[in-house]
């Protein structure tokens, strides 16, 4: 038996499918939403639909953007000879917050995981290799997570790049194992970046 009306229950069900939203949070959010003024609810819904339809991946670094090229790739003050490879846009944001990295990025949108059936062709690796052929890159810094998948991905990428003669480095360990980069403080990130080792 549903405790709430069908529509209320449908809203709770949808919300509880979001990451990090348990049954209780979903209920709280659902009640909050139905108590909001109609225009606020519409704005929320419109913003979600708008984001989903307008946001795409940058033609150069594959991060999420609503332009053809993201602000970092479009900036003339960034150093295009260094590319930092990260797993997702949130990791990129974490490094950007340090304000100390001046190169470009490449966002893989995942990591290689044989256990989950995610292979090299399932992440944006081909795009990275294409960039290395067409751009004047001197160093690739691999900043994938220090999880099993992140390490496997780093190894795989370094093996691919090594023959090209481009310098490949890996951020220093000290980034907690399995830790998402976005939860790591800026000092730790900077230390990991500055202490990177050549592979
Ligand atoms: Zn970009």
Image (cartoon, rainbow, N blue to C red):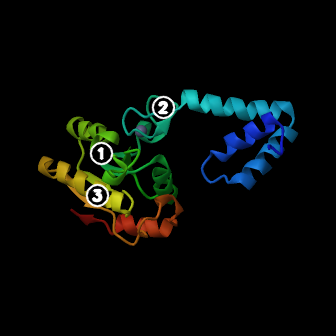
Element carrying mark 2: strand
Using a 10 Å C-alpha cutoff, classify the residue at mark 2 as few (fewer than 14 neighbours), some (14 to 19) or many (20 or more): some
Q: Earlier in the sequence, mark 3 or mark 2?
A: 2
Distance of mark 3 from mark 2, alpha carbons? 27 Å
Foreground of the two, 100 or 45: 45
Q: How many discs mark residues in the rendered view? A: 3
Labels 1, 2: front one: 1
Q: Earlier in the sequence, mark 1 or mark 3?
A: 1
Residue 64, horizontal then vertical, whole percent? 48, 38
Foreground of the two, 130 or 19: 19
Q: Is residue 39 above or below residue 9?
A: above
Q: Is residue 133 above or below residue 53?
A: below
Residue 193, horizontal then vertical, whole percent? 37, 64
Residue placed under numbered mark 1 in the picture:
119
On the rendered image, what quadrant is the C terminus found in?
Answer: bottom left
Residue placed under numbered mark 3 in the picture:
152
Q: On the image, which quarter does residue 46 sit in? A: top right
Does mark 2 have its CB less than 8 Å from ligand 1?
no
Kindly identify the residue that appears in the image at 23 percent across and 35 percent down: 134
Callout 1 touching callout 2 (CB < 8 Å): no
Kindly identify the residue that appears in the image at 38 percent across and 47 percent down: 105
Kindly identify the residue that appears in the image at 80 percent across and 43 percent down: 2
Residue 37 is left or right of residue 70, and the answer is: right
Residue placed under numbered mark 2 in the picture:
56
Callout 1 touching callout 3 (CB < 8 Å): no
On the rendered image, what quadrant is the N terminus found in?
Answer: top right
Foreground of the two, 3 or 1: 1
Residue 75 is left or right of residue 35, and the answer is: left
- Dividing the image into four quarters, tell me where ligand 1 lies: top left
Residue 60 is left or right of residue 98, and the answer is: left
């Amino acid at each position: 038996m549903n405790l709430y009306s069908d529509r209320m229950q449908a809203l709770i069900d949808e919300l509880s499918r979001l990451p990090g939203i348990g049954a209780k949070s979903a209920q709280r959010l659902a009640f909050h939403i139905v108590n909001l003024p109609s225009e606020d609810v519409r704005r929320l819904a419109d913003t979600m639909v708008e984001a989903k339809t307008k946001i795409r991946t940058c033609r150069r670094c594959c991060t999420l953007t609503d332009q053809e090229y993201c602000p970092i790739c479009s900036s003339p003050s960034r150093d295009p000879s260094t590319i930092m490879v990260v797993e997702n846009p949130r990791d990129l944001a974490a490094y950007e917050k340090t304000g100390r990295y001046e190169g470009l990025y490449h966002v893989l949108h995942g990591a290689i995981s044989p256990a989950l059936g995610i292979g090299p062709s399932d992440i944006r690796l081909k795009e990275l290799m294409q960039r290395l052929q067409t751009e004047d890159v001197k160093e690739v810094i691999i900043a994938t997570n220090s999880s099993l998948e992140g390490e496997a991905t780093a190894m795989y990428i370094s093996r691919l790049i090594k023959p090209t003669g481009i310098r490949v480095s890996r951020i220093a360990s000290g980034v907690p194992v399995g830790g998402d980069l976005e939860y790591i403080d800026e000092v730790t990130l900077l230390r990991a970046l500055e202490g990177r080792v050549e592979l």
